[in-house]
Amino acid sequence: MRSHTDLPERRPDMAHTPSRPFDIRDAALSDASALAELLNAIIDRGGTTAHEDRFTPERLTDSYLTGRAFLCCFVAVDRATGRIEGFQTLGRYPELPENIGDIGTFARNDGKQRGVGSALFVATCGRARRLSLSAINATIRADNVGGLAFYRKMGFEDHSTTLATPLKDGRLVDRVNRRFRLTP
């Protein structure tokens, strides 16, 4: 089990790390179109996100960049091309206590995003601590093997399961809720 001390605090010098080909920064409003495009590609592919409806830049902005639930959003930007390779959001979710943030991680599905999620998670954990959150919740589709493995690798532990959540096509898919504790 990972604890709150296993992940380093985000320091300014961690934003640019020579050993990885991307930088981590706060998302900007000007990123909305690129983020919507990235997320829509994941939605179109199917099978890994709970989202089934495509995002406009405006909907993405309200959901992940400025809306009432917004806590933070970080992007991973390819240093050579300037392309956003992934993003991670942290927000409030009505069914969660105020001291627990809800995370979403989205990385390009072209197979070139190695290390993006874990680098984003370092930044998100640092911000969550500064916001005095006690834990981070991740809700993952039970058929999203990669997502389940990613959050397990980051130290999330099973918390609960929501059984048989219907998809638009009528299929029933469980949702696995995992938590990462930020405080002992």
Image (tube, rainbow, N blue to C red):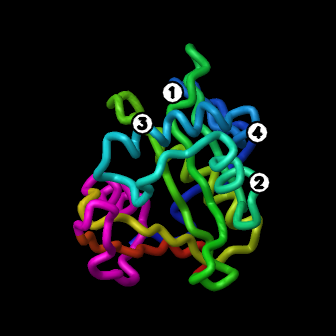
Asked if marks 3 and 1 touch (Cβ < 8 Å), the reply is no
Label 2 element class = loop
**Residue on which the image places disc 4:** 29
Please report the residue visible at 46 percent of the width from the left and 52 percent of the height from the top: 53
Q: Magenta stretch containing residue 169, yes or no?
A: yes
Asked if marks 1 and 4 touch (Cβ < 8 Å), the reply is no
Label 4 element class = helix
> Alpha-carbon neighbours of circle 3 within 10 Å: few (<14), some, or many (≥20)?
some
Q: CA distance from mark 3 to mark 1?
A: 28 Å
> Alpha-carbon neighbours of circle 2 within 10 Å: few (<14), some, or many (≥20)?
some
Q: Which mark is residue 63?
A: none
Which percent across, then down, holds residue 127?
Answer: 71, 58
Choose the circle earlier in sequence order: 1 or 2: 1
Choose the circle earlier in sequence order: 4 or 2: 4
Which percent across, then down, holds residue 128?
Answer: 68, 64
Which percent across, then down, holds residue 38?
Answer: 50, 35
Q: Nearer the viewer, residue 23 or 97?
A: 97
Please report the residue visible at 25 percent of the width from the left and 56 percent of the height from the top: 145
90 relative to 73, above or below? below
Please report the residue visible at 31 percent of the width from the left and 72 percent of the height from the top: 166
Label 1 element class = loop
Q: Magenta stretch containing residue 47, yes or no?
A: no
Magenta region: 145-171
**From the image, which quarter does the N terminus lie in?**
bottom left
**Residue on which the image places disc 2:** 66
Choose the circle earlier in sequence order: 3 or 1: 1
Asked if marks 4 and 2 touch (Cβ < 8 Å), the reply is yes
**Residue on which the image places disc 1:** 19
Mark 1 or 4, closer to the camera: 4
Q: Nearer the viewer, residue 50 or 180?
A: 50
**Residue on which the image places disc 3:** 41
